Amino acid sequence: MSKKPVAKKTAKAAKARKPAKKPAAKKPARVAKPLKAVTAKKPAKPAKAEAAASARKPKLRIATTSLSGCFGCHTSFLDIDERILQLVEIAEFDRSPITDIKHCGPCDIGIIEGGVCNAENVHVLREFRANCKTLIAIGACAINGGLPALRNHLDVTDCLTRVYCDRAGGKNHTVPNDPELPLLLEKVHPINEVVRVDYFIPGCPPSGDAIWKFLTDLITGRMPRLDHELLRFD
Amino acid sequence: MTDIANTLTVDGQTITFEPGQTIMQAALAAGVFMPHLCYNPEFKPHGSCKLCTVTVNGRPQSACTIAAMPGQEIQSDTPELNSRRRVLLQMLFVEGHHFCPGCEKSGNCQLQALGYEMEMLTPHFNHFFPDRGVDATHPDVMIDFGRCIMCELCVQASRDVDGKNIFALAGRGLASHVTVNSPSGKLGDTNLAVTDKAVEVCPVGAILRKRVGFAVPIGERIYDHDPISVKALEPDEA
């Protein structure tokens, strides 16, 4: 069972690396040049204006997490590509694989991928609900349980016994019961069966374009809608 | 009296119909889409899914079973009716096992396509997660009962077109389900052929031909580009 934390770490590390690389590679190349050009002409003004603007309007805080999901929706979120630079101009990330912050603080938007399959998922989900003004379920697992919910017609104890105790070749195998391991729930639940959810972005995963359309609609105060090409259940 | 024009209006649009047509038939022939799931133009309508419910002169009626009559004022594509249709779809989604990412029918499924059409973003209700089982005993056809929406089209097709009477609906209310007419209750013990109409007619992913799943790539499936409201009006589509 040491597999789980390791897998989590590597997934987080991979996520942390990706966005770090992208802006690092692009920012100096794209942003530095116009900045130089600007500073040559008007050194102080744009900086002042920006500072004034940001002082007037605090940035939106966005938190994201994956419960029992595959991080596919987060990967798809990164498919908004360089538009993430537009996003960070008006928003900053709270808890997210991008920041590696462990607990969610007060946020404007919380984005949840994955269903609820264990006790830890319930705690994380409730923490998000308590802190986020708007909670968005993203992807099939958060909306209908998805792939993990395929275990819902099986008996959990039977599954665990078969996997950990009945395998050939092993002796004295027991179901792992380290207190650090979150207990599995009897059934996997969509997140709206545990907390109130404000918006849903279906898809497995929803495309980067769908996520972008939905978020921009929401942030600019329009009714979020997805056209036929962007609305997918698969 | 014979001079009364055979016209009615759907959402204010005047439509000419042939006497004997249902409202659904008249609308589809005139190029007006009405959402439907259990209705198939090739079969006798029975009005069970209620998705095609419209208001006829203010009263809710199933468009697929009510005869078109002169002067009917019909409302179909209204926010109120569409939100009721969305709730019907949501109940169908939570009652069965409709996990689109894992279904061969995805992209060609009428239930899914109507979900898109009605902008159903979530099934909303608590999921049943039923365990209705899979019957893969037939060499060429499988049936996943969890995906069945009890539209009864396979029952009709097997009885009226194939002449085999292989499928039937059994049970009542929540317990109603499709059964297979063989001594063992298994599909493998019937004379079902892969070419039977009953296999082709399933609007969802319940009855599937084996070994053809995912043969059509994503992007080329029936509802990948055009919504069902466009596809249903094309001459070769149901």
Image (cartoon, grey):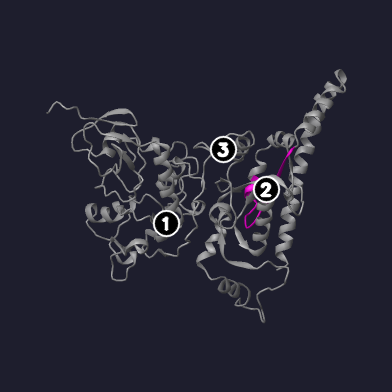
Residue B134: x, y in percent? 42, 63
Image height of A157 relative to B95, above or below: below
Question: In the drawing, what numbered circle is on residue B147?
Answer: 1
**Residues at badges 3 and 1 in contact (C-beta under 8 Å)?**
no
Image height of B125 relative to B223, above or below: below
Name the residue located 77 percent from the left edge and 29 percent from the top edge: A53
Tag 3 subunit: A
Residue B188: x, y in percent? 34, 65
Is A167 on the left or on the right of A30, as rendered? left
Q: Is residue A63 magenta?
A: yes
Can the viewer see residue B87 in this picture? Answer: yes
Which amino acid lies under the numbered mark 2 shown in the image of this protein? Cys
**Residues at badges 2 and 1 in contact (C-beta under 8 Å)?**
no
Tell me the residue that label 3 is attached to.
Answer: A224
Is B195 on the left or on the right of A228, as rendered? left
Which amino acid lies under the numbered mark 3 shown in the image of this protein? Pro
Q: Which residues are magenta?
A: A59-75
Which is closer to the viewer, label 2 or label 3? 2
Can the viewer see residue B238 in this picture? Answer: no
Question: In the drawing, what numbered circle is on residue A132?
Answer: 2
Name the residue located 66 percent from the left edge and 56 percent from the top edge: A126
CA separation in Å, label 3 and label 1: 30 Å
CA separation in Å, label 2 and label 3: 18 Å
Tag 2 subunit: A
Tag 1 subunit: B
Which amino acid lies under the numbered mark 1 shown in the image of this protein? Arg
Q: Quadrant of the C terminus of chain B?
A: top left
